[in-house]
Image (cartoon, rainbow, N blue to C red):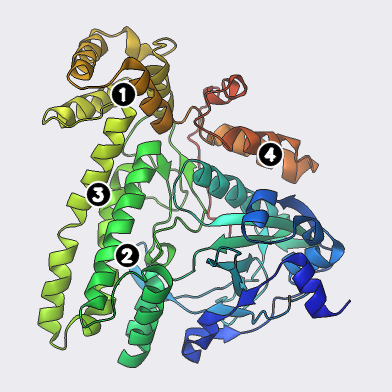
Amino acid sequence: MTKRQQSLEMGWHLDNSYSRLPKSFFTSLNPTPVQSPALIMFNDSLAISLGLNAGALRSEEGVAIFAGNAIPEDALPLAQAYAGHQFGNFTMLGDGRAVLLGEQLTPEGKRFDIQLKGAGRTPYSRGGDGRAALGPMLREYIMSEAMHALGIPTTRALAVVTTGESIIRETDLPGAILTRVASSHLRFGTFQYVAKWGTDDELRALADYALQRHYPEIEENDGRYLALLQAVIQRQAALVAKWQLVGFIHGVMNTDNMTISGETIDYGPCAFMDTYNPATVFSSIDIQGRYAYGNQPNIVGWNLARFAESLLSLLHEEYAEGARLAQDELSDFSEHYYANWFAGMRAKLGLFNEEKQDESLMGHLLQLMEQHDADYTNIFRALTLNQLTDEALFETSEFTQWYELWQERLTRQQASKESVQQLMRDSNPAVIPRNHRVEAALEAAVQRGDYRVMQELLDVLSNPYAYSNQQVNYASLPAPSTSPYQTYCGT
């Protein structure tokens, strides 16, 4: 069988539109081969949606592609260059351990990047080994698939292979490569890179490419770059609102980790909040709480301002006028965010219509949750099921007063009890990837080679709104601990 026949049998239909952009945007190179790859996780449903042959990809030849030991026909592997503000400090970056194989064209005509994460050194590695440890790659697999099931725009995980090699961090760790699928890997930092080191023509080429790929509905005219900024602002406002509504904490919201498409990307020190507290931080390197749960909308606004700065030369030939146009759009971010958040929070409370006092009702509940160290997800789960037990908050007079106001509010809308509960069930997940459950799955997989714990967790998380009997145990909280939970970047 020829290489082309083999690729076609696997279902690969790759294009390489990014490689047709200016050459300064990337470096062409192949992944670094590994010793003895083994497939340990494979996403059959995602593969099918991409038009891939799951059975063929599980073969030795398919695994070789996921490991970077073989390149599918029509792939033009490359590492992308970008920059970014990391914790507020601007620096040159790029794909230091990732290689983009190409863009899979699905049977429906959609286009998705296929990227190998942990595929070896690139010119952007900055002294790193370009490899990835098994634990962080499995964490990204769990978290990205959980986010997808929650209905939150995200990159996804197609496969994880072990490499048969050890990588050195604090200790020797098993190496792995994740195959990541994304609408694209265009980042705020991609635009920052070109604005800083490229020409206006190169910046225009990048912006036109982003428009064609993600916002084809925007007409090609003199105002299209301002329309691009508007569209990105709206998508990011919607995205961070979804994060807040489920208690997701990204952990490292640098501008290079924000996408033009509005997808969640780069699951490093991410985690879900248990006890409601806007100051919650899990990342070991976020000492100042820059990326705390309650600060995420503000950071998105800050990052959007940096993105807007990279577009100024395209917005208007006069810098001052371009800055004014950008500021006018940026000033609408808060309105877009709160519109999305209020709509989502109304749904979580079963409210179909709007009233002025809704904001007070929502704010009071969150205040009570914070005061009584209540679990964010389980409070809404209990309200959905009308099972007000197992939380100290429910025993307080303040909650009783709030509950009466909420019940009274529900009567002021044209909706049956059944439709109210259905709306709440559709808006409040019964389960999230609890930190202790994720850690248990990773420990079993990495330390003992047992992937059953992870697979069962993935099965439970695949339909978080099911409210099934299987999910009950996964809603339980971890045992009390004397030390706070911490997450790490996983580089």
Q: Is mark 3 on a helix, strand or loop?
A: helix
The number of numbered badges drawn on the structure is 4
Residue with the mark numbered 1: 369
Looking at the rendered structure, the kind of residue marked 1 is: Met
Q: Alpha-carbon neighbours of circle 2 within 10 Å: few (<14), some, or many (≥20)?
A: some
Using a 10 Å C-alpha cutoff, classify the residue at mark 1 as few (fewer than 14 neighbours), some (14 to 19) or many (20 or more): many
The residue carrying mark 2 is 88
For marks 4 and 2, the one nearer the N-term is 2
Label located before the other in sequence (4 or 1): 1
The quadrant in which residue 200 appears is bottom left
- Please name whichever residue, 271 or 28, is drawn nearer the observer in this view of the structure: 28
Q: Which residue is rendered at x = 49% and y = 27% of the image?
A: 430
Q: Cα distance, mark 4 to mark 2? A: 35 Å
**Label 4, on which residue?**
454
Question: In the structure shown, which secondary structural element does the residue marked by tag 1 occupy?
Answer: helix
Separation (CA) of disc 4 from disc 3? 34 Å
- Distance between mark 3 and mark 1 Cα atoms: 22 Å
Look at discs 2 and 3 and give the one toward the viewer: 3
Residue 337, numbered circle: 3
Q: Nearer the viewer, mark 3 or mark 1?
A: 3
Badge 4 amino acid? Met
Q: Is residue 134 left or right of residue 472?
A: right
Of marks 4 and 3, the one in the foreground: 3
Whether residue 373 is situated above or below residue 296 in the rendered picture: above
> Which badge, 4 or 3, comes first in the chain's sequence?
3
Residue 52 x/y as whole percent? 70, 61
**Marks 2 and 3, how far apart at CA:** 22 Å
Q: In this view, does 143 lie above or below 430?
A: below
Secondary structure category for the residue under label 4: helix
Which class describes the residues within 10 Å of circle 3: few (<14), some (14-19), or many (20+)? Answer: many
Give the mark nearer the N terminus: 2 vs 1: 2
